[in-house]
Amino acid sequence: MSRRDLGYRAIFGVPILVGVLSLIGLVGALLEDGAWDWIGVALLGVSVAVISWALLRRRPGSERFRDRGERG
């Protein structure tokens, strides 16, 4: 599947969702106390977990890295 086959939602869906969850977590934790503090921690933890998962999943020996040197 090439990048041309992917639509807007397939490319930007997860980053937008992570950004919205982070924003809700930040605003909720700043404006309210009690449960919103814990909800904010959980929602911000989601963004850290997604970014960590993506970085750990990315391997230097993957096909993406080999293709870069072959383009002329």
Image (cartoon, grey):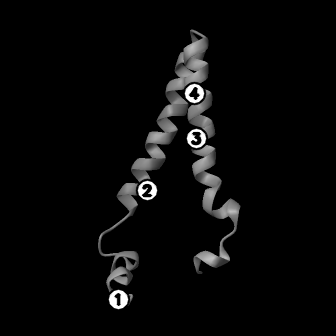
In the rendered structure, the answer to whether residue 6 lies left or right of residue 72 reads: right
**Disc 1 crowd, CA 10 A, few/some/many (<14, 14-19, 20+):** few
**Disc 3 crowd, CA 10 A, few/some/many (<14, 14-19, 20+):** some
Residue matched to label 1: 70
Q: Earlier in the sequence, mark 4 or mark 3?
A: 3
Answer with the quarter of the image where residue 10 lies: bottom right
Residue matched to label 4: 25
Q: Earlier in the sequence, mark 1 or mark 4?
A: 4
Q: Earlier in the sequence, mark 4 or mark 2?
A: 4
In the rendered structure, the answer to whether residue 60 lies left or right of residue 14 reads: left
Local SS, label 4: helix
Answer with the quarter of the image where residue 21 lies: top right
* Residue 54 tag number: 2
Q: Earlier in the sequence, mark 3 or mark 2?
A: 3
Residue matched to label 3: 19
Q: Amino acid at mark 1?
A: Glu
Q: Going 57% across and 43% down the picture, which residue do you hit? A: 18
- Above or below, 34 against 16 in this view is above
Q: Going 35% across and 88% down the picture, which residue do you hit? A: 70
Answer with the quarter of the image where residue 32 lies: top right
Mark 1 vs mark 4, foreground winner is 1
Q: Could you tell me if the residues under marks 3 and 2 are in contact, i.e. CB atoms within 8 Å? A: no
Local SS, label 3: helix
How far apart, in angstroms, are the residues tagged by discs 4 and 3? 10 Å
Q: Earlier in the sequence, mark 2 or mark 1?
A: 2
Q: Amino acid at mark 2?
A: Ala
Local SS, label 1: helix
